Amino acid sequence: MKKVAFYTLGCKLNFSETSAISRKFEEKGYRKADFTDTPDIFIINTCSVTDNADKKCRKIVREARKISPEAYVAIIGCYAQLKPKEISEIEGVDAVLGAAEKFRLVELLDGFKREPLARILASEIDHANAFEPSYSIDDRTRTFLKVQDGCDYSCTFCTIPLARGKSRSSTIEEVISQAQDISERGVHEIVLTGVNTGDFGIRNGKREDRFIDLVRALDDQVAVDRFRISSIEPNLLNDEIIEHVAASGKFVPHFHIPLQSGSDRILKNMKRRYLTDLYTSRIAKIRQEMPDACIGVDVIVGFPGETEADFLETYKFLNELDISYLHVFTYSERPNTPAAEMVNSVPHKERNRRSKMLRILSEKKRRAYYESQLGSIRTVLFEEDIQDGKMYGYTENYIRVGVKYDPLLINELKVVRLSNIDEQGNAEAEEIDLVLH
Ligand code: SF4
């Protein structure tokens, strides 16, 4: 029985797709192995958003070759779609597969026989128009279920539409059926994932459903404890969705909403589909419906032309906004994007300084949010996340809670009272005896 190992870089979508591809291998009689367990085949799922994607890819290929010098090495993922030729020239690579080909990898590379030259199976991105359902099951506690892929927006800094193609989705029936399968495996939390998740509902280039229809159907028909929405564009997060989550017993009060800049001038240059007023109104609506909701924000610093004044506008905007944490990205030029051609690029040292300032702000926001929740009663889903005799899990509103390690708590939902914040900044809990499952 041939052994196959996977290495995944990048986002949750990549992880869910690696899982789906690994299941296809298992169905064909291959055995899944650890990366270091001398596999016969290595599949490396790459990311184009990761800085130094090229260097990382080379490094993993080198490591794979060291572990199994004769193994077959195939590269898939966003970076493979964007730079197939470049990757095929990396020493030790046997095949590169694009977005339209990666799910047929087992059939296309039948036999996995090494040849003197690397094979490139990567068609133009417009060929990637099928939707491939995927979900990750590596971690029993929480599963990432892909409901949507690709993006029809054209944010000037982003390569994702080039790497993943047009917006397309699963059907509501298919998502429900997968969510039911997942829940039957004993998973308590399903995270709905996509490139532009809120754009769910496009099939063959036509809008067939809306994201709110999916949310309602899942709530009605799937007996899982928790649904979490991974990330949603502010212009798509409408009142209907917010009100549904507020009233739902399953959709948790946690939103992750990309902002990218607090300057309207920069938002326009980024070709985002909203301005700061709309963003503020979304946060206000969430707070009105769910005062304790956790709100995470993506922000990019150092976009071309971002002056000190623009950055300070962003800082002030975020400082005044009632949010819980930030994900800060330092802008870096991506080939073939309009932003990479823009003038007035921000010096790297300055990008790093701005990034640091926002990271400090994020820590302050997170701390204040955690403090606001002390004394409240929450449900924690404990994970196999164990460090120094403690184990961790998340509340519905995304507070990381640590308690003394107890193996029986793994994958259990427990009602706790948040009591304290420890030195690492995690919440501590008391009264962990009321078991829900
Ligand atoms: S919404 Fe913008 S940033 Fe997000 S994937 Fe689409 S193009 Fe990229």
Image: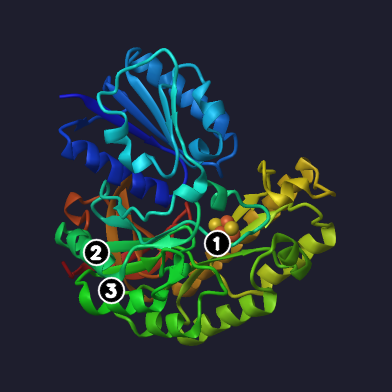
**Which sits earlier in the primary sequence, circle 3 or circle 1?**
1
Above or below, 254 relative to 356: below
Left or right: 86 as drawn, with respect to 61: right
Q: Position of residue 395 (x, y in %)?
A: 35, 66
Q: Using the rendered view, name the quadrant where residue 214 is placed.
A: bottom left
Q: Residue under circle 1?
A: 152
For residue 421, above or below residue 250: above
Contact, mark 3 vs mark 1 (Cβ under 8 Å): no
Between 250 and 109, the residue placed more toward the observer is 109
Residue at screen point 61% across, 54% down: 328
Q: Residues within 10 Å of mark 2 (few under 14, many from 20)?
A: many
Q: Would you name the residue on which mark 2 appears?
A: 179
Front in this rendered view, residue 387 or 437? 437
- The residue that appears at 26% across and 64% down in the rendered structure is 174
Quadrant where ligand 1 appears? bottom right
User: In the image, is the residue at mark 3 within 8 Å of ligand 1 by its beta carbon?
Assistant: no
Which residue occupies 35% across, 85% down? Answer: 247
In the rendered structure, which disc, 2 or 3, sits on the residue that comes first in sequence? 2
Amino acid type at circle 3 is Leu
Contact (Cβ within 8 Å) of mark 2 with mark 3:
yes
Residue 175 visible in rendering: yes
Asked whether mark 1 and ligand 1 are closer than 8 Å, the reply comes as: yes
The mark total stands at 3
Which amino acid type is marked by label 1?
A: Asp
Which quadrant is the C terminus positioned in?
Answer: bottom left
Residue picked out by circle 3: 218
